[in-house]
Image: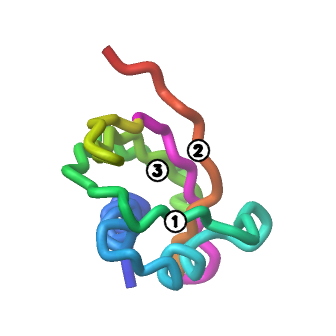
Amino acid sequence: MPSTAEQLMRSRYTAYTMGDMDYVARTWHPSTRPADLGHDPSTRWLGLEVKSHVASETGDTAEVSFVARYRVAGKASRMAERSRFVREGEQWLYLDAAALTTR
């Protein structure tokens, strides 16, 4: 079980690369988890770069900024987000994200 939001972010990325959508769903907060995760098996994940990990003073919320690179149908793309996480008990859960502008 990941002990930080950054560890959870990295494990969720790995789950996406492996197509383990059950793990993605289990680590997504129920209040924001969509019914359909929209997994595209043709997506090829190429790398993850964590830019920052900032935990709140209470340690129960955190934000992780990252850039993930991927390829779909031969076209390379990148996703840049600032994801929010919440800790409930001992478990970190993904809450939501805001897209970041990258250069």
**Which quarter of the rendering shows the C terminus?**
top left
Q: Which mark is residue 39?
A: 1
Q: Which element type, helix, strand or loop, lies under badge 1? A: loop
Looking at numbered disc 1 in the image, what kind of residue is underneath it? Answer: His
- Name above or below for residue 67 compared with residue 22: above
Residue 23 x/y as whole percent? 48, 82
User: Marks 2 and 3, Cα distance to the nearest angstrom?
Assistant: 15 Å
User: Marks 1 and 2, Cα distance to the nearest angstrom?
Assistant: 17 Å
Describe residue 47's horizontal placement relative to residue 57 as left or right: left
**Which quarter of the rendering shows the N terminus?**
bottom left
Say which residue appears at 63% left-offset and 51% top-offset: 96
Magenta stretch? 80-90
Please tell me in which quadrant of the rendered image residue 6 appears: bottom left
Looking at numbered disc 2 in the image, what kind of residue is underneath it? Answer: Ala
User: Marks 3 and 1, Cα distance to the nearest angstrom?
Assistant: 29 Å
Q: Which element type, helix, strand or loop, lies under badge 3? A: strand
Q: Which mark is residue 55?
A: 3
Looking at numbered disc 3 in the image, what kind of residue is underneath it? Answer: Ala
Residue of label 2? 97
In the rendered structure, which disc, 2 or 3, sits on the residue that comes first in sequence?
3
Which residue occupies the foreground of this view, 40 or 63?
Answer: 40
Say which residue appears at 73% left-offset and 65% top-offset: 34
